[in-house]
């Protein structure tokens, strides 16, 4: 009589092999912006209703700007034109959308209007995606700096730490995705 252990052992080995090859569970999604990260922790930060309202307005304006940037990147246009569609180098889209403040990264633009980087549009998709990410990061940084000013000074530092942790987590995820 054949031993029933052999089929069980084989099944166990297959299950272990599949588990070893399974990709790691994807991490929880990040908030959509630095401002959204702070809003997600409003209770912990003790934000007032007025502060929450201001942050929500500024986050909505940021999302409009991000949509414009994405539309401009997706729209065909002559080289160096800001890609047609949305005003990549045009006037700010809302009161908080003035000139960038360095992009929050070492070597950021630090000056000029939105879209000045678009004067030399990259041709390959990876470079274009990286340029779009950089413009979105600049918009996020600018919106956060504007939003931070609306916070009571007693809450700014803790809120800034939340925003910084969000930006670090976003950079870590992008780096990890680039290694795959």
Image (cartoon, grey):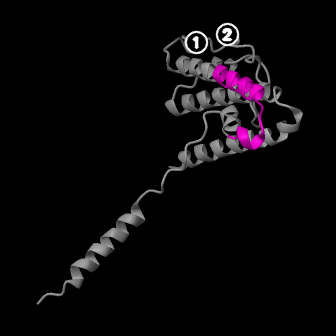
Kindly tell me whether residue 8 is visible in this rendering. Answer: yes
- Contact between marks 1 and 2 (CB within 8 A): the answer is yes
Q: Residue furthest bottom?
A: 1
Q: Position of residue 82 (x, y in %)?
A: 60, 15
Q: Tell me the quadrant of the picture where the N terminus can be found.
A: bottom left
76 left or right of 81 in image: left
Q: Position of residue 177 (x, y in %)?
A: 54, 46
Instruction: Please name whichever residue, 65 or 113, is drawn nearer the observer in this view of the structure.
Output: 65
Q: Please give the name of the residue rendered at 70% of the width and 28% of the height, measured from the top-left corner.
A: 138
| Neighbour tally class for label 2: few under 14, some 14-19, many 20 plus, Cα within 10 Å | few
State the CA–CA distance, disc 1 to disc 2: 8 Å
Which picture quadrant has residue 5?
Answer: bottom left
Main secondary structure along the magenta-highlighted residues? helix
For label 2, the residue is 90
Magenta-colored span: 41-62
Q: Looking at the image, which residue is at 74% across and 28% down?
A: 49
**Which labelled disc corresponds to residue 86?**
1
Mark 1 nearby-residue class (10 Å; few <14, some 14–19, many ≥20) = some
Q: Nearer the viewer, residue 49 or 72?
A: 49
Indicate yes or no whether the magenta region holds residue 59.
Answer: yes
Determine the image quadrant of residue 99: top right
Q: Position of residue 121 (x, y in %)?
A: 59, 21
Residue 8, placed above or below residue 110: below
Q: Is 149 in front, or is 13?
A: 149
Q: Judging from the image, what secondary structure is the residue with disc 1 in?
A: loop
26 lies above or below 156: below
């Amino acid at each position: 009589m054949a031993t029933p252990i052999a089929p069980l052992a084989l099944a166990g080995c297959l299950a272990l092999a599949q588990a070893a090859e399974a990709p790691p569970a994807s991490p929880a999604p990040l908030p959509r912006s630095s401002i959204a990260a702070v809003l997600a922790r409003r209770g912990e930060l003790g934000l007032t209703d007025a502060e929450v309202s201001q942050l929500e307005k500024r986050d909505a304006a940021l999302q409009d700007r991000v949509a414009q940037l994405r539309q401009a990147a997706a729209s065909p246009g002559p080289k160096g034109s800001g890609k047609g569609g949305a005003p990549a180098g045009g006037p700010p889209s809302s009161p908080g959308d003035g000139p960038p403040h360095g992009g929050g990264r070492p070597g950021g633009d630090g000056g000029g209007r939105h879209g000045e980087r678009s004067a030399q549009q990259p041709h390959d998709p990876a470079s274009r995606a990286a340029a779009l990410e950089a413009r979105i990061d600049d918009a996020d940084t600018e919106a956060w700096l504007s939003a931070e000013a609306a916070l009571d000074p007693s809450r700014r530092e803790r809120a800034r730490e939340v925003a910084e942790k969000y930006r670090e987590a976003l950079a870590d995820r992008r780096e990890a995705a680039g290694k795959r």
